Amino acid sequence: MPVVLPVSELQRNMGSIADQCHESKQPIYLTKNGKASLVVMDAAEFDSRFAALDELREREKRVERAISRGYDDLLNGRVRPLDQARQDAERIRKARHGA
């Protein structure tokens, strides 16, 4: 459950709110006139979450590129039956591993 406090609470109790952020690693939502205004959280946790988000975005881009290449291969006739692809993959695997 997210912590929601009025922004005036931050002005009065900055130290304890900072401690709470560091301990919980969760964001604290601050409101002004009853509406969400700011979010405060531990800086290391913030950086960690954004790094994870960046990693997910990069992975998503790689998947999109792979799908695009596959679709392009399909449109241009660069495809083969599944059984043949499996046989080719097995042949390559054996050649690499000497089996």
Image (spheres, rainbow, N blue to C red):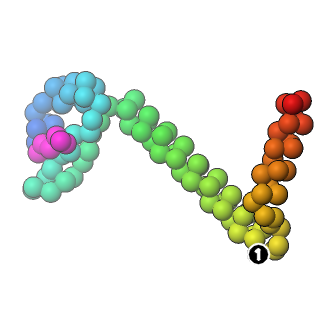
Horizontal and vertical percent for residue 12?
10, 33
* Residue 48 place in picture, x, y as percent: 44, 34
Which range is magenta?
A: 1-7
Q: Residue at x 76, y 75 (%)?
A: 75
On the picture, is 35 further left or further right than 61?
left
Q: Position of residue 32 (x, y in %)?
A: 13, 52
- State the residue at coordinates (27%, 35%): 26
- In front: 36, or 93? 93
12 and 54: which is toward the camera: 54
* Along the line of sight, the residue nearer the viewer: 3 or 66: 66
Q: Report if residue 3 lies within the magenta region.
A: yes
Query: Taking 51 as reference, is 23 above or below it?
Result: above
Q: Quadrant of residue 96?
A: top right
Does residue 80 lie above or below 44 as drawn?
Answer: below
Is residue 89 or residue 6 the one in the foreground?
Answer: 89
Res 45 → quadrant = top left
Residue 18: give x, y in percent of width and height. Answer: 23, 28
Assign the C terminus to one quadrant of the image: top right
> What kind of element bears circle 1?
helix
Numbered-mark total = 1
> What residue is at 29 percent from the left and 30 percent from the top?
25
- The single residue placed furthest to the bottom in the displayed view is 75
Disc 1 target residue: 75
Q: Measuring 11% from the left and 45% from the top, which residue is drawn there?
A: 6
Please give left or right for residue 43 compared with residue 85 in the image: left
Local crowd at mark 1 within 10 Å, few (<14), some, or many (≥20)? Answer: few
Q: Amino acid at mark 1?
A: Leu
Of the 4 image quadrants, the one containing the N terminus is top left
